[in-house]
Image (cartoon, rainbow, N blue to C red):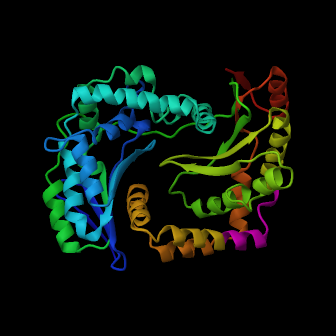
Amino acid sequence: MYRKVILNNGIRLVTERIPTVKSVTIGLWVNVGSRDERPEEAGYAHFIEHMLFKGTASRSATDISREIDALGGEMNAFTTRETTTFYVKVLDQHLPQALDLLSDLFLRSRLNQKEIEKEKQVVLEEIRMVQDDPEDLIQELHTKLVMGTHPLSRPILGKASTIVHIRRQDLLEYMNQHYRPEGIVIAVAGNFDQRTLEKTMARLFGRYQASTGSSSGTRWPAELHGGVTMKQKPLEQVHLCVGLQGIAAGHEDRYVIYALNSVFGGSVSSRLFQEVREKRGLSYSIYSFLSGYSDTGTVTVYAGTRAGEVARVLSLVSREIEKMARRGMTSEELKRTKEQMKGGLMLSLESSHSRMNKLAKDELIAGKHTSLEDMISEIDAVTEEQVSRVARTIFTTDNMALTGLGPLSSRQMEILRRQLPVSTAES
């Protein structure tokens, strides 16, 4: 059963009681991410996420780790370009202890300067780790190409030059500006008593107020860019990303583009996987994925291949893009992908953690809850006409973006220039 309550300070509490499970997951979502940082603040949102686990007025970092382990639970956090999330999952009988721990981290973190200095090294290692992972690095480079100078283009981890100069006061000022009650959603899913939960939440979080300071800045949509950018790196493969215009997370055509992506490259039965890997053996890993933000979105194809097969792989990807634009998908493909989407959706929502994620995203994106039944109805309602209309809009090579990483030669640069009718740049 779904319920939404707004605490006196404006924090939104959204819950779904599932009496058939023995777990409960609590997620505290702050509507702030890397896109809300100024250039000189690059990496602050992610760094704060780390720091809230480094000790409170009553618990050390070690105490926090031992306490959640003693409960047999899971506690973690993650930062995206638009949100920062702290969550804990425990057996339902341990909910009071979990809420006490989560509220302590969020409300009473010490942000000790000595811990900040240590955590700088941890985050710098995380940045280096991305540099050593070609699949992560190519997607970071590709986002920068597509988003240009927009804040969405910046790496979530930030820049090393910014991280090394972080001070405690910088983090406090950033939290005062962005960690405001009206931008916080607490989502709870699992087995719990509703009345007891609401009283506990009001007691623990109802008095939270951001310190005095200006409110967070206004977001604006990104203008997406095409083009070609290449980075030389001594690797065994060339890693490629091809980017197209997508749609925002809450767009009315979201189920249509989900279906299109599934058929195009989002599954092992997809056209890209079958044409590039299964039929020709040109790539071990090839797939497409959607990135949906509050006001814009992208479709991205990733592939890793031998240096000598770059042109061939790109030709096949371009061909599938053009086929999707011209023909959309067959009635059989649409029927199959609808069943796939519904099955994946229902399976994904079997855990309290997945339900918690959905509750929070529904509230942040649309400000309302969408039931599983409504989602299935919307999937069933997708028509071939809608698929054709959206395919013609999305799958166009007019403003295609291409990023390459690996042992690329000047000859391959010329090949890319001929294959894509867009400007090129080399780095």
Q: Residue at x 83, y 46 (%)?
A: 316
Examine the image and state in which quarter residue 307 appears.
Answer: top right
**Residue 271 visible somewhere in the drawing:** yes
Instruction: Compare residues 177 and 104 and report the one nearer the observer.
Output: 104
Query: Relative to residue 204, is residue 402 depicted above or below?
Result: above
Horizontal and vertical percent for residue 73?
32, 59
The residue most toward the bottom is 20
Instruction: Compare residues 15 and 163 and report the one nearer the observer.
Output: 163
**Residue 26 visible somewhere in the drawing:** no
Examine the image and state in which quarter residue 357 appears.
Answer: bottom left
Horizontal and vertical percent for residue 334?
72, 69
Instruction: Compare residues 319 and 218 and report the one nearer the observer.
Output: 319
Left or right of 26, for residue 207: left
Query: Relative to residue 359, is residue 46 depicted above or below?
Result: above
Q: Quadrant of the N terminus?
A: bottom left
Residue 4 forms part of the magenta stretch: no
Q: Quadrant of the C terminus?
A: top right
Instruction: Compare residues 283 and 296 and report the one nearer the observer.
Output: 283
Magenta-drawn segment? 326-338
Horizontal and vertical percent for residue 127?
48, 30
